Image: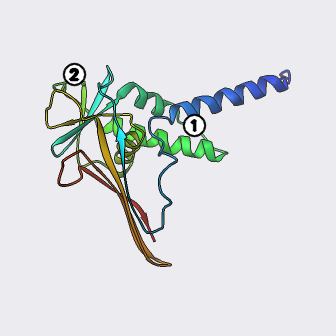
Amino acid sequence: MPAPRRPHALYRSALLALLFMSASTALTAAPADRPPAGTDVDQTRTVAQWQQPAADCLAVAFEGVTVRLDRQALARQAAARPARWRTEAERLALIEADRAAALLSAAADATDAHGCAQRVEAPLGAAAQAVVLAALENGNAAVYVKEAAEPVPAVAIRYLGSRCGPTCGRGHIMVSVPGAQAPFLVQEWWVA
């Protein structure tokens, strides 16, 4: 019969697991300061982005805009997938890991002008798009207009929701670069 584990060893392993999961969601977790879903809202905020892409980056190409993400951080996020979940934090870590894995699996080997070794072309699946949106909301991307030499300093993120009744309404999140006439990324946020 194996020897029982000491309580401090159990606490230490649980604490390490929670720290790893919380650190691994930093890239892809949605920010805490989103307006509440399911309400009338029209709010735009400006989010500063990286001024240099990560050394090992993944380029996500939209029409006229390329978003460069840290490929190693995405790989760590995908590898942090818990086998099972028992808590809400573990459930969210599972979702975020699956989303990161979806974006990585959509990537093809193709070096771009800024040295990113992998590229993904839009349109993206919902899971992959959620990763890109979360990175933009958290300022964890380098954003280039066309093939500009320098990234834009910030993006505008607009939260637009309209509630027309208890079971009627819709919200979207739209991301655009300064001076653009239309957003390069639109994601459905909520539906009632």
Name the residue: 30% across, 43% down. 155
Q: Is residue 29 left or right of residue 91?
A: left
- Which residue in the protein does label 2 denote? 115
Name the residue: 50% across, 78% down. 166
Number of other residues with Cα within 10 Å of mark 1, as a class: few under 14, some 14 to 19, many 20 or more = some
Q: Position of residue 38 (x, y in %)?
A: 48, 67
For the residue pair 39 and 69, the one nearer the viewer reads as 39
Indicate which disc residue 82 carries: 1
Q: Is residue 18 left or right of residue 159?
A: right
Q: Is residue 119 left or right of residue 69?
A: left
Of the 4 image quadrants, the one containing the N terminus is top right
Say if mark 2 contacts mark 1, CB within 8 Å: no
Q: Position of residue 105 (x, y in %)?
A: 33, 37
Q: Position of residue 88 (x, y in %)?
A: 63, 47
Q: CA distance from mark 2 to mark 1?
A: 32 Å
For the residue pair 111 and 135, the one nearer the viewer reads as 135
Q: How is the image coloured?
A: rainbow
| Quarter residue 42 falls in | bottom left
